[in-house]
Image: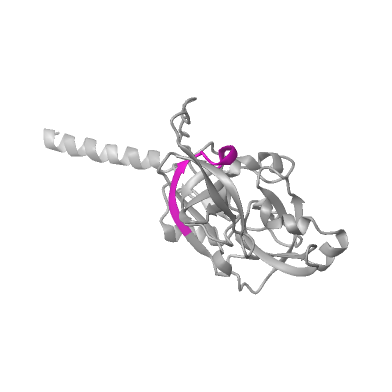
Amino acid sequence: MSSERRFWHRFFSSVALVSCCLGGIAQAKTLVELSATAKKTTVFLTVEYVDHLTNTVKRQTGSGVIISENGDVLTASHVVKVWQAQTDEEKQDHRIVGRIGDIHASRSFDMMTKDVPDNPDIALLQFFDQTDPYPTANVCFIQRPATGSTLTAFGFPDHGNFTPATGSFSNAGGDGGLWQVGVPLTEGMSGGPVYDPEGNVVGLVKGAIDFNANVGFVVPVAWSRGVLQARAGVDQKCLTQAAQPQIPANSEVNQTCNEVLFSDMSVSPPRFEKRTICQ
């Protein structure tokens, strides 16, 4: 075999080997692919409740994500806490309703709360209807993404329809380790899933700084371990075997922290509170 033929033989053999090895590794999805995947499992939530201060019936909206074939749905606790605070009789009259992928979906599902802890800001709901198995998102527990890596949130902003919002991970300098992200999050997206490029749900939308639409906060979905530990059929199903970045013990030492105004986007008008963020 000539030297030139040996070169091309080795070249194509190497290409075949690389293709083989990459076959089991999840590849980054385009936004179109990611949106199509997320739409099947992202839930539009309508929460009806009695405001005990004004004695009137109100509604607020949020988002969630289906994580088991049994219809378990993760969302943010603050989306449903007002409903949870009602009496049993009020809960019978005023419901949490979910629609999958579209606010105008012809089929709606009554929902129950399974676990609504004070901390972290993650709640577990479930569809009452157990007739058929539900499509599920791939939940992946990670400590934190690499700084600058792409994240995409999905939800139903400003009472609008299913929408993606893409940006990047900044740091884990939010209160208690919340992820600070450069993603344009708006009212109505609270509780919605946050995906990595491979199609894993790695977080849930927490909220945003009111005066800066491109600074938001995400609750790591890994914080749901306590909520999910007793649920059958709920497991993390990471679509990538990539190693997670290591965080040096002194990684926060040189950060600059500031107090900012934070908006709770699940209600209208939004509620505001002061929070600390670090850069």
Given residues 238 and 4, the one toward you in this image is 238
Outermost residue on the top side: it is 249
Q: Start and end of the magenta stretch?
A: 165-178
Residue at position x 83%, y 68% from top? 93
Provide residue 79's location: percent of width, then percent of height.
67, 57
Q: Residue at x 39, y 38 (%)?
A: 21
* Image coordinates for residue 65, horizontal then vertical, percent: 61, 55
In the image, residue 228 lies at what x, y percent? 69, 43
Q: Residue furthest right?
A: 89
Q: Quadrant of residue 52?
A: bottom right
Judged left or right of residue 48, residue 106 is left
**Front in this rendered view, residue 205 or 6:** 205
Q: Does residue 139 appear in this view?
A: no
In the figure, 192 relative to 253: above or below?
Answer: below
Residue at figure coordinates x 23%, y 38% from the top left:
11
User: Does residue 171 belong to the magenta stretch?
Assistant: yes
In the image, residue 99 lies at what x, y percent? 65, 66
Q: Is residue 200 magenta?
A: no
Q: From the viewer's perspective, is 267 left or right of 96?
A: left
Seen in the image, is 224 located left or right of residue 114?
left
